[in-house]
Image (cartoon, helix red, strand yellow):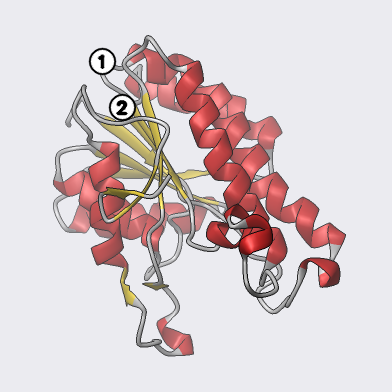
């Protein structure tokens, strides 16, 4: 088994970005901890990777259940002693059809922030000793182009769609920059990646702008394996810095 370990959240969907990222990292020699809210589903996905000759295990992890993160950290620490890569891919989009900020359901806003920002923050806290124990750890937060609606501020020409989700991804990018500053002086690099429009729900049909999850996974894996002099605190799309 490789001595490099990666943990990928939100990897339970067979056609999802999370499992595509897990596969990409495993193909590069990482032992991948595949996580999902359903532990059985996580192990099913890990078993598929193992059937492909890759190194993987499944683990239950729900970003909304921050009280359980100590167990997750203990599992990783006891089994591997360190964590080389953390990919925060798990996310929720509770307000896909909400057309504006003023139409936002505040309960949806809380849910989006709890999962997409607070959960990520708490997980990095819980795993930080294991990240510091690695020789060159990388943290990648999966963002979304939706954040640009918020970043544009008053210059945005339309109403902000999916406002809870969009605002949470904007906040996630800010968290990314702050975590990068927090890890300054260590070998831990923290970046966010906008994966673009990804075809993760084939049962709903494919839009012209969508691309296969494996194509976007390449760029998440790129940020997860940056060299020592690589960037930190940025938001990237296909390797190009957006912010």
Residue at (32, 24) in percent of width and height: 137
Cα distance between the residues tagged 2 and 1:
8 Å
In front here: 45 or 160? 160
Asked if labels 1 and 2 touch by Cβ distance under 8 angstroms, the answer is: yes
Q: How many marks?
A: 2
* SS at mark 1 in the image: loop
Residue 198 in view here? yes
Q: Give the position of the C terminus as an image quadrant.
A: top left
Reading the image, the residue beneath label 2 is 84
Q: Which residue lies furthest to the front in this view?
A: 155
Q: In this view, does 64 lie to the left or right of 235?
A: right
Residue at (70, 31) in percent of width and height: 67
Across and down, in percent, residue 180 comes to 45, 25
**Which callout, 2 or 1, points at the residue further toward the start of the chain?**
2
In front here: 13 or 179? 179
Across and down, in percent, residue 91 comes to 56, 55
In front here: 201 or 238? 238
Reading the image, the residue beneath label 1 is 135
Residue at (34, 43) in percent of width and height: 57
């Amino acid at each position: 088994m490789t001595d490099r370990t990666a943990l990928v959240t939100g990897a339970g969907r067979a056609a999802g970005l999370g499992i595509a990222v897990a596969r990409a990292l495993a193909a590069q020699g990482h032992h991948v901890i595949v996580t999902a809210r359903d532990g059985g589903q996580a192990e099913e996905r890990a078993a598929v990777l193992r059937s492909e000759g890759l190194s993987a295990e499944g683990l239950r992890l729900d970003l909304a259940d921050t009280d359980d993160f100590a167990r997750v950290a203990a599992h990783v620490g006891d089994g591997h002693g360190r964590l080389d890569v953390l990919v925060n891919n798990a996310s929720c989009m509770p307000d896909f059809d909400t057309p504006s900020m003023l139409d936002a359901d505040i309960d949806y806003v809380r849910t989006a922030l709890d999962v997409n920002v607070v959960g990520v923050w708490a997980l990095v806290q819980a795993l930080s000793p294991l990240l510091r124990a690695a020789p060159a750890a990388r943290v990648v937060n999966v963002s979304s182009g939706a954040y640009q609606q918020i970043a544009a501020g008053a210059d945005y020409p339309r109403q902000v769609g999916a406002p809870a989700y969009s605002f949470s991804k904007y906040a996630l990018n800010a968290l990314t920059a702050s975590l990068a500053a927090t890890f300054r002086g260590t070998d831990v690099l923290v970046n966010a990646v906008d994966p673009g429009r990804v075809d993760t729900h084939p049962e709903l049909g494919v839009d012209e702008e969508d691309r296969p999850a494996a194509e976007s996974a390449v760029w998440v894996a790129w940020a997860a394996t940056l060299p020592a002099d690589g960037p930190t605190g940025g938001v990237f799309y296909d390797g190009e810095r957006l912010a």
